[in-house]
Every structure is written in structure tokens, then in C-alpha cells.
Amino acid sequence: MAKAEFGTAKYQSKKLRAAGLQKLKFYCQLCSKQCRDSNGFKNHLSSPSHIKKVSEIHESGDSSKLIETYSTKFQDEFIKLLRINHGTKFINANKFYQEYIRERDHIHMNSTRWRSLTSFIKYLGKNGIVKVQTNDESNEEEEGFNLEIKLIDRTQTLNAYQIKSGGNSLEDNDEMNDDKLLQRQIKRGQEMEKDKDAEKSKTLEQLVPTSAPVKLTLKKKKTATTKKLVNAFDENESE
């Protein structure tokens, strides 16, 4: 099929359609390419450029890391737009998601670790990022359409924490905790020094003689007694 010539009405029509929002299921997040229909998307998946990127990711083993990167970007962009457009007011989750996907180059949910909008909203509510409530008046039966979300105001949380902690800010409390920790370490060091000094003095007392007078006991040496020898012949001579 021949391409439309530049400047013609058909060319302008195709250009406008390409610039608009296409179906999300025909978008390749890995290649950042939007296809118009299923046939174009199928051709893209079998293209050498796409196959090369997929093989490189499999060989490097970074597939899980890539999904985590897309998930982080998706969450950051989602929360940023929610803060800008609605602040801390409740908004239907699906309605706001339609606002989010109007941006052509947004991170698509099918490239993240969340398989549905409901699972993503539950994750945000579980981690205290948004407040989630169910709209019982909604007649929508599809999952996720009756969820209302509101961004949690961190300033209110900080103010409540400051009131609870006696009017000190988080930085002041951190400094106080650091000072207390430092004081405990100094006190512990001083106690250890005292223990060392006590051990040293105890050792010196054992080694150095005391100033008390030393008593010496002298024992008299016993002299050996010599027996007088008597000559037996002297007696005979005197007779």
C-alpha cells in the first residue's frame, strides 16, 4: 500500500491519528512504540529490533529489575499527577486513571508488577500512600470502578507527630535522640575508664609492698654437742 503524499489531506489525517491516544494493548513499553492495530503490533513483536532487545534482557538477567524500574516510575507519575490535579480530595480511581493515561508517553500498567488497577490501588492503600474507600452508591459491577482514592497529606501527619512529641519537629527530635545517644556513650565510656582504673589499682596493690613494718623472726641455730671421749687406758694407768 502506497504511503500518503506529504501535505495531502490523507497525510494530515494519518498524522493526527498517530499523535492521538491509541489503544494501550497495542503499545510496546520496551521499545516505546505505539502501534495502531493488532496487525501492526503483531508485526512489531516479530521485528528484529524488538527480538534483539528481548534477547539482550534475557541474557543479562535484568528482566525483574526492569519490571521494578517501570513499577517505580509508574507509581511516582501516578502520585505526582494525583497531587497536582486533585490534591487531597477524593476521586474515583478509574476516572483518575483515565486522566493519567491521556499522556501518550506514560508508563503502561501492563509493564509493571501490577496486573490490574484494583491491585495497584490496594497496594497504595496498604502502604499508607493514599486513603481508599468504597463508593456503595456506584452501580458499576466491574472491579475497581467503585473505589475512591485520596492522597494522604503528609503535612497533617507531621503536625500530628509534632503535637504528640511536644511541639518539636522531626529534625529537632532526631537531634535530641542523637544527643541522648552521645550522652549515653560518654557515660558508658567513663564507667569503663573507672573500671579500668580500679583494675589497675588492684593490680598495683598486689605487686607493691605495703608500708607496714616487716617483722623478722630469727631462730637460734642449734650447735652440735660434742661428747667427751674418755680413754679407757687412763683409768688403768691411775691404778
Image: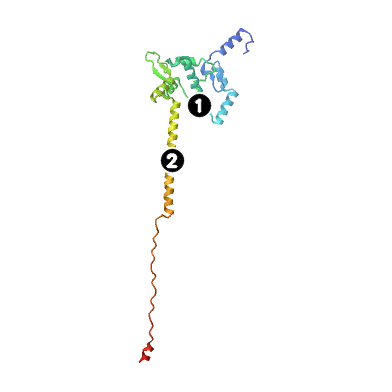
Residue 190 is marked as: 2
Q: Is mark 1 on a helix, strand or loop?
A: helix
Q: Which amino acid does label 2 sit on?
A: Gln
Count of number-bearing discs:
2
Label 2: element kind = helix
Q: Which of 22 and 76 is in front in this view?
A: 76
Q: Which residue is drawn at 52% across and 25% down?
A: 69
> Any mark on residue 156, and which?
none
Quarter the N terminus occupies: top right
Q: Residue at x 40, y 19 (%)?
A: 132
For mark 1, what is the residue? 68
Please, which residue is most extreme toward the bottom here?
Answer: 239
Q: Earlier in the sequence, mark 2 or mark 1?
A: 1
Point out the image quarter for the C terminus.
bottom left
Q: Where is residue 158 in the image (x, y as percent from the top left)?
A: 42, 22
Image quadrant where residue 180 sits: top left
Q: How is the image coloured?
A: rainbow
Q: Residue at 45% across / 34% down in the picture?
A: 182
Q: Where is residue 48 in the image (x, y as percent from the top left)?
A: 60, 24
| Residue 115 pos. (x, y %) | 46, 22
**Along the line of sight, the residue nearer the viewer: 236 or 28:** 236
**As shown in the figure, which amino acid type bears the numbered disc 1?**
Glu
Q: Residues within 10 Å of mark 1 (few under 14, many from 20)?
A: some
Labels 2, 1: front one = 2
156 and 146: which is toward the camera: 156
